[in-house]
Image (cartoon, rainbow, N blue to C red):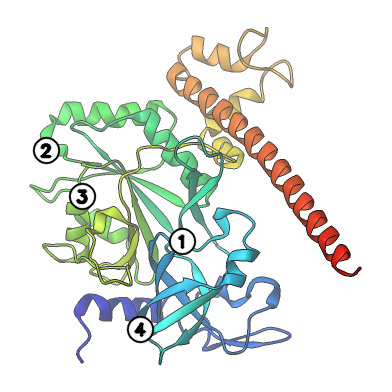
Amino acid sequence: MTTSKPKQALVNALANSDRTSDVCDDSEHTVPVASAPLWACTPPDKSCDLGASIARVTAVDRDQYLVRHAESEVPAKLTGRAIYASESPADMPCVGDWVHVEYYDSGAHASILDVLPRQSFLRRKRPGDDVEFQMIAANIDMAFIVQSCHFDFNVRRLERYLVMTSDGHIEPVVLLTKTDLVSPAALEQLVSQIRHAGIGAKIIKLSNISGMGFEQLRELIQPGKTYCLLGSSGVGKTTLVNRLVGNSDLETGAVSLSGEGRHTTTRRQLIVLEHGGLLIDMPGMRELGMLGISEGLDNSFADIQAHSTNCRFADCTHTSEPGCAIQSAITQGELDPGHFQSYLKLKNESAFHDMSLLEKRKKDRAFGKLVRSVTKAKGKRKDY
């Protein structure tokens, strides 16, 4: 059976992705890592089984997964032990994860044993009232943050994406799409707004009509490296993916074991690009809730952090204290007030959710302790 061009390219890309050798040695085991990158050479807790293989999660649909190892991409499910060992939903596999798997049914299906340590990640607070992390994707080298010049442009939303990528140790690149729908002067004004907000990330202006910017974008993509697309629905991500993949129509597939197909933009999946890079395509995200993002916040608002070191008081709240360097910078036009207000909003939002998560963790531990004590008491009564 002949392997299709996209699938064969994915095989080649995985086979060449940062591997250092055919095996990875530690003090206890020798693990085959034909498709594993350097950081995957140390399994979690050095506890992998000799019979386990290393595969990559290429798609997720609820509790069902697709994993790829060498030339096979098969459906997979988590083992009960892996589910029980997970302390939070963030421990569950997501697209881009490297995992230990065991194959069965002559290699037609796989069981996921555990998730290997992530070198980078993309996460947010779960949508709605649930205060918990939601893993979006993992092991990403570069994130393309897509904003349309026509209707979706929003610096404040862009700042949220930048905090997410910085917190997950992912290099960001801003892609401005549909540039042909605005005048050159208006386009430069949008770029100016980004720079005025203290955002120093690389910006690429794209036009599907003239092809402007696509060669510059392709130069960033390297074989075996992993990229992701972030942005709202309708900003041109699907058209962008089609050009990068080299197809006029993005290939659709199914994670469901029933064989029911789904449109590619309704789920996250790992696809191959024309020149061997790997791209995690995902639907637009309506909510970008902040949770546990202190590192990403400080990095993304480094200009504010730099000004704050000159405040008279170490515990300055940057609101009404005398000698506040940030308020002085705003007054003198050195700092955008909207940028500063965005910083405060994200900081307060994350602090509120962090506290809520801490309280939830305490309640979960207390409940778990109660369950164990009741179970233990029942066991003692049975002894009599």
Q: Residue at x 26, y 78 (%)?
A: 7
The answer to whether the residues at label 1 and label 3 have Cβ atoms under 8 Å apart is no
Q: Which residue is at 38% across, 32% downward? A: 157
Q: CA distance from mark 4 to mark 3?
A: 35 Å
Question: Cα distance, mark 1 to mark 2?
Answer: 36 Å
Q: Residues within 10 Å of mark 3 (few under 14, many from 20)?
A: some
The front one of 258 and 20 is 258
Q: Residue furthest left?
A: 209
For disc 2, the marked residue is: 180
Tags 4 and 3 touching, CB below 8 Å = no
Which residue is tagged 3?
Answer: 213
Quarter-of-image position of residue 265: bottom left
Quadrant into which the C terminus falls:
bottom right
Q: Nearer the viewer, mark 3 or mark 2?
A: 2
Q: Residues within 10 Å of mark 4 (few under 14, many from 20)?
A: few
Q: Are marks 2 and 4 in contact (CB under 8 Å)?
A: no
Q: Which residue is mark 1?
A: 94
Which mark is nearer the camera, 4 or 3? 4
Q: Position of residue 356 (x, y in %)?
A: 63, 34
**Observer-nearest residue: 33 or 364?**
364
Instruction: Report the residue at 46% width, 61% height from top.
Output: 94
